[in-house]
Amino acid sequence: MTSRKKALITGVTGQDGSYLAEFLIEKGYEVHGIKRRASLFNTQRIDHIYQDPHASQPNLKLHYGDLSDTSNLTRILREVEPDEVYNLGAQSHVAVSFEAPEYTADVDGIGTLRLLEAIRFLGFEKKTRFYQASTSELYGLVQEIPQKETTPFYPRSPYAVAKLYAYWITVNYREAYGMYACNGVLFNHESPRRGETFVTRKITRGLANIAQGLEGCLFMGNIDSLRDWGHAKDYVRMQWMMLQQEKAEDFVIATGVQYSVREFITWSAAHLGITLRFEGEGVDEVGIVDKVEGDDAPAVKAGDILVRIDPRYFRPAEVETLLGDPTRAKERLGWVPEISVQTMCEEMVAADLHTAKRHALLKAHGYELPVSIEG
Ligand code: NDP
Ligand code: GDR
């Protein structure tokens, strides 16, 4: 038997799950992750930390499971007996939640209840600490700027409504059963591991592909949207810190600075040596190349249109502006974000450019790989 602390992560194959698993292994934890059965490999983000499962004491163990499956979750919890559960699994795309609202409610809302109830059913409520991946999307139509722990919620999507249920059921299990259960109300956080259809990664990947001649134009939705973007590495550290306190409490995690999607596009282009200017208004707005410097964008020249607006990426109800106030996290936990959004943007562009160059090289030698531009 091992005396190491045990953590169970739902959503271990996602952006945050992969960074959190790395972080906890580094801290000496035995990490268990729940992965979904898929028809293609879905463990790319954690393959580098996954050891041979036959090793005597592997740091990371994976279990097949799904947040929609109560008996499966209960069985995994009974088998693992975790000290800490991090519920990061979710249908996490806001726009997709309008297409699949019922599924999103089931996985993101009721999935959280299933986990909490399984912990209680197994009698682990005094042993197992529970972290819920809550979201700034709860603020939706913002009632106060900046948003903090006491700001009223006004969710604007099926995703946010499902996460609202998850937020309150977590609070309720804490109050009703004395569980150590808490919500991290996290503002947007990104990284080179961010899913390709979220806006930052869509931009860095799309522009890197365009620079290398693999794509023609980036089609975007609402580029006036304002977000408070941090780095996922900083934010998973905070998820762990929240479970190490004497008393469970909910925290807003944010940088306290906001920028527009348009600004993020401009920075990303600049990292590729492209000076981009925006002209026109509304759906007619375009991003045009002023000049190109350096060797990173051989397929781009002055006058090219790299960005166009496509209304299919508009949302039925938009969250126009989010800006968090992380004062409580700073004061009570000593947490401060270490990586700025500009540094993160540079890191993301560099990673996507690296991949685009490899694809371009293969293409030049007749081995073209399909580049999906859906986002
Ligand atoms: P990702 O979309 O990268 O990862 C989501 C994870 O959930 C993946 O591992 C996915 O599996 C898994 N998952 C999806 N559906 C199910 C299901 N039915 N059962 C079990 N697992 C499932 O999200 P992030 O890592 O970016 O975010 C982590 C969590 O934090 C999410 O709950 C998200 O809603 C929340 N959040 C994220 C923020 C952000 O800016 N990143 C901000 C605030 C909250 P698979 O790999 O197979 O798809
Ligand atoms: P968000 O992230 O909805 O805030 O949810 P996303 O990156 O998808 O959108 C941010 C803003 O950019 C606007 N936007 C576009 N978004 C996408 N995806 N694609 C586009 O082409 C595009 N054009 C403009 C959006 O309208 C929006 O205003 C993320 C997810 O990680 C959630 O799980 C998490 O809870 C919140 O962040 C906090």
Image (cartoon, rainbow, N blue to C red):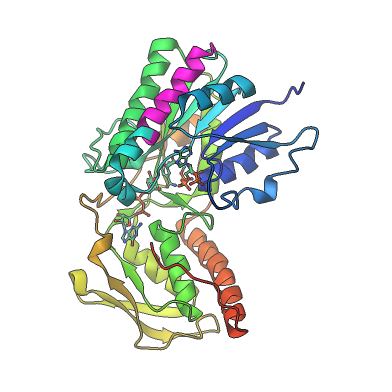
Q: Can residue 91 be seen here?
A: yes
Residue at x-position 55% and y-position 53%: 40
Left or right of 94: which side holds 359? right
The magenta stretch is: 107-123
Nearest the eye: 314 or 43: 43
Residue 231 percent location from the top left of the image: 50, 51
Q: Can residue 147 be seen here?
A: no
Residue at x-position 20% and y-position 76%: 280
Quadrant position of the C terminus in the picture: bottom left
Residue at x-position 24% and y-position 54%: 315
Identify the residue at the far bottom of this view: 302
Image height of 316 relative to 286, above or below: above
Residue 287 percent location from the top left of the image: 31, 76
Image height of 181 relative to 61, above or below: above
Image height of 330 relative to 321, above or below: above
Residue 260 percent location from the top left of the image: 32, 60
- Prevailing SS of the magenta stretch: helix
Residue 66 percent location from the top left of the image: 49, 34
Q: Is residue 120 magenta?
A: yes
